[in-house]
Amino acid sequence: SGGFDEEFAAEALEHEDAFVRMWTVRLLCDDRKVSDSIADQLAVMATGEPYAQVRSQLASSARRLPAAQGLPIVKHLLTRSEDEDDVHIPLLLWWAIETNAGEARELVLALLEEPDAWELPIVQRHILARLMRRYAASGSRQDLIMCAKLLQQAPSKGHTDELMQGFEEAFQGRSLAVLPDELVEAIDKSGSASLVLQVRQLKPDAVKEALTLAADAGGDAAQKLALLQIFGEIDLPASVEVLLGTISGDAGDTLKMAALTSLMRYDEPRVAAAITSAFPSLSTDAQAAALTALASRAAWSKVLLTAVAAGEVEAASIPLD
């Protein structure tokens, strides 16, 4: 690659043989920087290159170049909708974007400055949720502000829904207290925050709805599971009644185990009594979750031992460990 001069490189990139073009791209970018004229030629090449192997190499090489040279190549490759189902190219493009997500935030944001860019199949399917998740997972103020900018820049609710999916995945089990005001405002304006996220924000109407849905015996099981888990991640004493009702009712093992885990957050004497009372009727797996809960506090352990001594819980049902 060190023997390439400008004229020869330009000619090689236009060679009729795809193999030659592919290797020229690879060798040119070995030094992690090319001339501005070659960078421009690579970007133009990305818009019309007919062979997937060459486009794949362009995507891979774009990651190795400085953001100002590599991201224009990425921007053109994102328009190539024929690569939406390719097993490599979309992820190579994401790799190039993620590499620059920290030091070149504004250049990354510029990839989505045009509303049409949000409609590109590769962007919708492979980039939006990942990009939001990347910035949300970082947790730094700069990156959380980027989350706000993405929400503000999104042209439709469908796009904010995609972004919020990535955001909520990144913040599972994490406190929302660290969110900057700009992001909180952007989330509220987007209208795409799920009920779970609104509950995590302790919004009164959302909390009321969540308690009702979680207590509904005929409700959606997946939604109920998510809500029961959230009740164990935030301080919501009003949820204790719902959690206790879940372990004593006809809910399935998955829901009961989630409720038992969440109840560990609430240091109330009645919780230990209710768990111990329900213990004999629980499945083996649910009993294991119940024992974990009861063993988590000294006072609760005493309630269990008292029930064993009284014959209300069989000693044999408690594993040696």
Image (cartoon, helix red, strand yellow):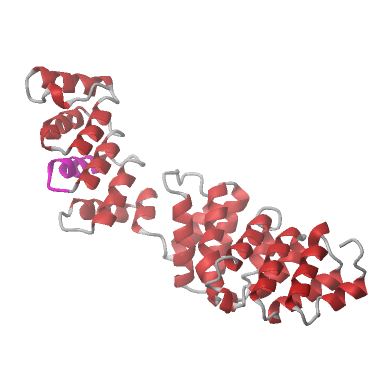
Query: For this view, does 310 lie left or right of residue 300?
Result: left
Residue segment shown in magenta: 238-251
Q: Measuring from the top left, give residue 275's x and y in whole percent.
A: 17, 33
Where 315 falls versus 103 (above or below)?
Answer: above
Q: Measuring from the top left, give residue 11's x and y in whole percent.
A: 86, 78
Q: Determine the main secondary structure of the stretch shown in magenta.
A: helix
Q: Measuring from the top left, give residue 37's x and y in whole percent.
A: 86, 73
Closer to the camera in the image, 276 or 314? 314
Picture quadrant of residue 241: top left
Q: Can the viewer see residue 301 in this picture?
A: yes
Residue in the picture at 57% in, 54% down? 135
- In which quadrant is the N terminus drawn? bottom right
Where 15 falls versus 260 (above or below)?
Answer: below
Judge whether residue 239 is colored magenta.
Answer: yes
Q: Can the viewer see residue 32 in this picture?
A: no
Where 140 falls versus 299 (above or below)?
Answer: below
Toward the top, the furthest residue is 309
Q: Measuring from the top left, give residue 181's x and y in whole percent.
A: 52, 52
- In which quadrant is the C terminus drawn? top left
Judge whether residue 199 is colored magenta.
Answer: no
Query: For this view, does 175 lie left or right of residue 116?
Result: left
Picture quadrant of residue 272: top left
Closer to the camera in the image, 299 or 64? 64
Residue in the picture at 50% in, 69% down? 125
Residue in the picture at 41% in, 44% down? 173
